[in-house]
Amino acid sequence: MDEYTFTENFNNQERPSKTYLCYEVERLDGNATIPLDEYKGFVRNKGLDQPEEPCHAELYFLGKIRSWNLDRNQHYRLTCFISWSPCYDCAQKLTTFLKENRHISLHILASRIYTRNHFGCHQSGLCELQAAGARITIMTFEDFKHCWETFVDHKGKPFQPWEGLNVKSQALCAELQAILKTQQN
DNA sequence: ATTTTCAAT
């Protein structure tokens, strides 16, 4: 991913009409975590401006996971950094996937919380996803930096945080915690 | 064309 694409999409104070999802996979073996570099990359949604059928980024990601045919006798952790948190529909599809694939753990780190009206409501979607075992968090400085170093063609340049990154991240974190907590009770 | 959330209005 080039620098511009990363900054344009992951800046937590912007609100672009597209979504990028960066993913990486580790195999868990006892206390050891073994990175699987062959399963690393990023996808973006297909919007109305493109020839393909519209499709949210998460669904491409699910398609990729299925195509890997990860060994059901092993345990894997998938980490995905997504510029918008999953909508209700995508959250449900991820929930179903996790229930059917107990050998896979999922950690979603979102740059921003997606709240646009779709059918259903995003809060309950995220809660169900968490109940299915997913870990859902907001991206912090360290996460943006990790993404920059892992997925961006940074040409040796260090990650440059934008103005207000931490303040926004903390506000979104509080918002997400309120969402995930409310529905548990 | 405008607004500004994986486009909706």
Image: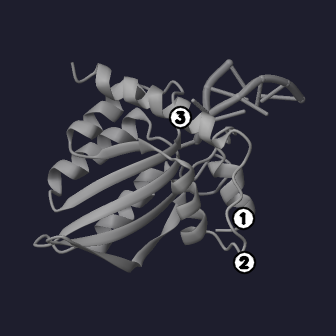
The residue pinned by badge 1 equals A3
The residue depicted at 41 percent of the width and 53 percent of the height is A59
Question: Are the residues flagged by discs 2 and 3 in contact, CB closer than 8 Å?
Answer: no
| x then y, percent, for residue A32 | 22, 74
Quarter holding residue A13: top right
* Residue depth check, mark 2 versus mark 3: number of the one nearer the observer: 3
The residue depicted at 30 percent of the width and 54 percent of the height is A106
Circle 3: element type = helix
Residue A49 higher or lower than A127, as above or below: below
Q: Quadrant of the C terminus of chain A?
A: top left
Amino acid at dot 2: Lys
Task: Name the residue at the left extreme.
Answer: A73
Q: Does A67 sit left or right of B2 as displayed?
A: left
Residue A35 higher or lower than A89, as above or below: below
The residue pinned by badge 3 equals A170
Work out how far the residue at label 1 is from the one at label 3, CA to CA, in angstroms.
24 Å
Q: Is residue A167 visible?
A: yes
Question: Are the residues flagged by discs 1 and 3 in contact, CB closer than 8 Å?
Answer: no
Chain under disc 2:
A
| x then y, percent, for residue A105 | 24, 57
* Residue depth check, mark 1 versus mark 3: number of the one nearer the observer: 3
Amino acid at dot 3: Gln
The 10 Å Cα crowd at callout 2, few under 14, some 14 to 19, many 20 or more, is few
Q: Earlier in the sequence, mark 1 or mark 3?
A: 1
The residue depicted at 31 percent of the width and 71 percent of the height is A26
Q: Does A66 sit left or right of A60 as displayed?
A: left
On whether disc 2 and disc 3 are found on a single subunit, the reply is yes
The residue pinned by badge 2 equals A155
Chain under disc 3:
A
